[in-house]
Amino acid sequence: MYWARAKRELARADPVMRAVIRRHPHAQLSSRGDPFQTLARSIVGQQISVRAAQTVWEKVNARLPAVTPAHTLEAGHANLLACGLSRRKAEYLLDLAAHFVSARIAPGRWQAMNDDAVIAELVEVRGIGRWTAEMFLIFSLLRPDVLPVDDLGLQRAVSLSYRDGRKVTEAGLRRIAKVWQPWRSVATWFLWRSLDPVPVEY
């Protein structure tokens, strides 16, 4: 795992980042595990509370023999609706499962693919946009150099830590983040910690 090296290099390159890292010396990102379940959970959790998403996810787990692409397709629309999913989210889950079953999404290929190629593959699924794909790269694939410029938490953290509370543009954020390369995922994660010390799971 690259975490210790990334922390050292970020701390050397950026005094602001060094201060944030020092406030959270033992914090570390760990993978969220199974790709299909991670993406499915991200769809389930869209635009609802964490508690509501957990309740729906537990119902999905109880209704399916296992939360796999094949079992999700076999369950069909009606069973997913019965778990508390909206009609649209049920369609999104079925589309995600179909992409896995047909190998349009094939995790075995990802190691040889760059970040943009993986993102391009993921956003072909209904209900998965670039932000969701970027969160997946950071939290599940542990890709080290993802910069989610549209993430509101990152924008706010950069504004507070680097701009004295002034709004930061996308171009400005990218300029600040240049010094973080090739560890922009790690820098982003620590900036999230500067706002909330409890890690959020995606």
Image: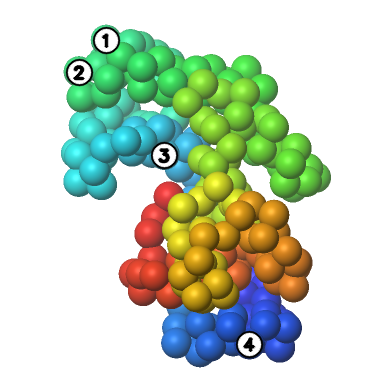
Identify the residue position indicated by label 4 in the image.
15
Q: Are marks 1 and 3 in contact (CB under 8 Å)?
A: no
Residue 42: image x %, image y %?
Answer: 41, 39
Q: CA separation, marks 4 and 1?
A: 54 Å
Residue ID for mark 3: 42
Q: Quadrant of residue 84?
A: top left
Where is residue 188 drawn, in percent x and y? 56, 65
Separation of residues labelled 1 and 3 (CA atoms): 20 Å
Q: Earlier in the sequence, mark 4 or mark 1?
A: 4
Tell me which label, 3 or 4, sits earlier in the chain. Answer: 4
Q: Residue at x 32, y 27 (%)?
A: 65
Q: Which callout, 2 or 4, points at the residue further toward the start of the chain?
A: 4
Q: Find residue 143 and report its image quarter.
A: bottom right
Q: Which mark is residue 82?
A: 2
- Foreground tag (2 vs 3): 3
User: Where in the figure is residue 124, as x and y percent of width and height?
Assistant: 62, 23
Determine the CA span between mark 2 and mark 4: 52 Å
**What amino acid is at disc 4?**
Pro
Mark 3 crowdedness (10 Å alpha carbons): few <14, some 14-19, many ≥20: some
Q: What is the three-letter code of the residue carrying label 2?
A: Ala
The kind of residue tagged 3 is Ser
